Image (spheres, helix red, strand yellow):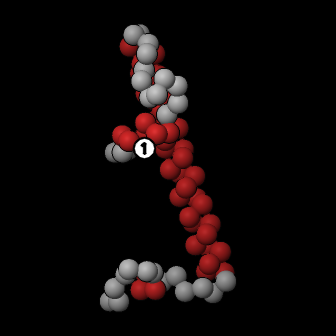
């Protein structure tokens, strides 16, 4: 489930308020906003994966035990 605050932050238009009284238009706007939010999340995940791949190529330690705040197991 998406965080509603993030969806509202990503949304555009009337400050995140659906101003149309047509239920079909309201549904279309809500679905588009969900699609846009999912696309941003997916893009961020791809960016993170690329950075991790680059760090692995540079032989930079990236094992969970080396991450800040993690505990050795």
| Residue drawn at the location 55% of the way across and 55% of the way down | 44
**Closest to the observer, 2 or 17:** 17
Residue 29 vs residue 51: left or right? left
Above or below residue 49? Residue 67 is below
- Residue extending furthest front? 15
Q: Quadrant of the C terminus?
A: bottom left
Q: Position of residue 65 (x, y in %)?
A: 41, 86
| Residue drawn at the location 49% of the way across and 44% of the way down | 38
Q: Position of residue 12 (x, y in %)?
A: 53, 30
Is residue 72 visible to us here? yes
| Residue drawn at the location 62% of the way across and 78% of the way down | 55
Q: Position of residue 66 (x, y in %)?
A: 46, 86
Residue 22 vs residue 44: left or right? left
Element type at marker 1? helix
Is residue 35 visible to us here? no
Q: Quadrant of residue 68?
A: bottom left
**Closest to the observer, 57 or 40:** 40
Above or below residue 46? Residue 31 is above
**Which residue does the numbered mark 1 point to in the structure image?**
6
Above or below residue 12? Residue 58 is below
Q: Quadrant of the N terminus?
A: top left
Above or below residue 29? Residue 21 is above
């Amino acid at each position: 489930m998406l965080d509603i605050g993030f969806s509202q932050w990503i949304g555009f238009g009337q400050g995140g308020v659906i101003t149309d009284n047509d239920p079909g238009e309201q549904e279309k706007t809500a679905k588009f906003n969900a699609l846009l939010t999912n696309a941003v999340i997916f893009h961020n995940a791809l960016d993170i994966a690329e950075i991790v791949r680059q760090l692995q190529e540079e032989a930079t330690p990236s094992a969970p035990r080396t991450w800040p705040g993690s505990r050795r197991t």
